[in-house]
Image (tube, helix red, strand yellow):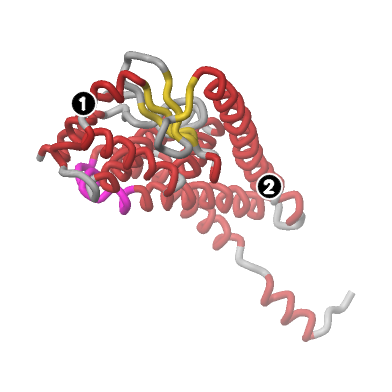
Amino acid sequence: MLVSEADAALTGALVIPHGVVIAAAGVLGAVAIALAWPVPVALSRASWPMRTPIMALLLWQAVGLAGGFSMIGALALAGFAALPAHPWLALIPAAGFTLYLLTHLAITIVQVTRLRHRHLALLEMLTSPHPTRARTRVIDDAVPVAYCLPRGARSVTVLSQGLLDRLDPDELVAVIAHERAHVEQRHDLLLLAFRAWRSALPWFPTAARAEVEVAALVEMLADDHARREVHDKVLARAILQVGASGVPGADQPVSGSTRVSDRFRRLAG
């Protein structure tokens, strides 16, 4: 069958050389590998994130997003290189990986939402409202505990009686300001994404590393918010009193960090 000059010109404009497709797939694959291993490792070992947690958090988000898109793009281009005559079949691996990631994100959201509902129900049974602070519950426990349960407008801050008895008034202001930062800045949403990434890619050691590093940076970011209301030494004392008690999430408290010593050192230094 003869092809008109116009059709030939149009066809030629749409055809990408096979070698270019292979090269592009290789570049994206190399980017994906770099963002999946050496870049997160180098970022987690750097000291500057402690000084500028906002920039570090933005960079971690960029690494996660760029890594995911580069993986998907590499799979799509590799499919086109392998099956140039069947573009729809070529997209199956990339589409399947995208669906896999989105499914894990949806599952994580559902799991976290259920845990928060259950946690809130338990709090209503086992705690009492704070006499002067709205959306604050007090649990009758001698251990100093402070954390927030993020639920949008229904977010709740939980304080133990032991914490109220042990802390000085200015230290209590520091702790409450820290917890309020978690709620107001919606740190739970940021951690939710990295929790889903870890769930989707459990065989990637850097996925677990990223979740831990982001959790620590979130705590430092909340500390910086509290520093606007109290002196650094006051906040440092409060951190030592409360200690490590988890990271922001549905089923874990948030006042502490997996690296309390880092938080204390950046305040004391």
Return the x and y of residue 32 as percentages of the image width and height.
Answer: 46, 47
Quarter of the image for residue 182 reads top left
Quarter of the image for residue 15 reads bottom right
Q: Which mark is residue 95?
A: 2
Q: Residue furthest left?
A: 269
Q: How far separated are the C-alphas under marks 2 and 1?
A: 48 Å
Q: Is residue 41 magenta?
A: no
Q: Which of 60 and 82 is in front in this view?
A: 60
Q: Earlier in the sequence, mark 2 or mark 1?
A: 2
Crowding around mark 1 (Cα neighbors within 10 Å: few <14, some 14 to 19, many 20+) is some
Return the x and y of residue 168 as percentages of the image width and height.
Answer: 20, 30
Q: Nearer the viewer, residue 105 or 170?
A: 170
Quarter of the image for residue 98 reads top right
Identify residue for label 1: 240
- What's the residue type where badge 2 is placed? Ala
Return the x and y of residue 184 as percentages of the image width and height.
Answer: 43, 48
Q: What element carries label 1?
A: helix
Return the x and y of residue 189 as percentages of the image width and height.
Answer: 50, 43
Left or right, 189 with respect to 109, comes to: left
The residue shown at (62%, 67%) is 16
Left or right, 136 with respect to 174, comes to: right
The residue shown at (27%, 39%) is 173
Q: Residue furthest right?
A: 1
Total number of numbered labels? 2
Q: Residue furthest bottom?
A: 5
Q: Give the foreground label among 2 and 1.
A: 1
Q: Is mark 2 on a helix, strand or loop?
A: helix
Left or right, 149 with respect to 258, comes to: right
Is residue 30 in view?
A: no
Q: Does the magenta stretch include residue 55?
A: yes
First to last magenta residue range = 46-56
Q: Residue furthest front?
A: 131
